[in-house]
Amino acid sequence: MALAAQALIFLEMLGLGFALGLWGDMLRLVSRRRAKILVAALDILFWAAALCLVFIVLFNLNFLEIRLYAFASLALGVFVYFRYFSPLALRFFAWVYRVSLKAAAVLARVLAPLLLPLRFAAIILDRVSLFLIFLIAAALEKCREIKAPGQEIPPAA
């Protein structure tokens, strides 16, 4: 295998390790103060997805030829992320989460007056559609009763 191909594999696995560290931090932020069963399920899903992602990347890079430097660069990418970037990323994710909650609260406060007319419109639409369905069903029933004599449908053969 050429040195350039090995360098490409090393760099891509390094980036994948960095991305998996970032994704793990997001999962850690989301799973705070959650039920233990949910955290366990999220951890299992994370590791299954990470395994599939590593498999796909290795398969696309070198047809799943397993080399020690590929896994070493993956571990190095995770280490570099957690050593230097994790605190910054956690603060950024926490800020985004707080801003999202505040924006959702403001949006709920703005849209709250619109809920009553929307509910009223939904009730009216529901009643009208039920009435139309009733009329169509009654018309179809009358059509069955008005059949001319001798127009019976023969039984299927």
Image (cartoon, grey):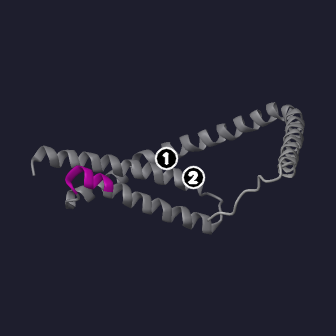
- The amino acid sitting under disc 1 is Pro
Residue at the spot of label 1: 87
Q: Nearer the viewer, residue 72 or 59?
A: 59
Residue for point 23% across, 50% down: 61
Give SS at disc 2: helix
Q: Residues within 10 Å of mark 2 (few under 14, many from 20)?
A: some
* Residue bounds of the magenta highlight: 56-63
Q: Residues within 10 Å of mark 1 (few under 14, many from 20)?
A: few
Instruction: Please give the label number shown on residue 29.
Output: 2
Q: In this image, 99 relative to 9: left or right?
A: right
Image coords of residue 69 (percent x, y): 21, 57
Residue for point 53% across, 46% down: 90
Q: Nearer the viewer, residue 43 or 96?
A: 43
- The amino acid sitting under disc 2 is Leu
Residue for point 83% across, 51% down: 144
Residue for point 43% across, 58% down: 49
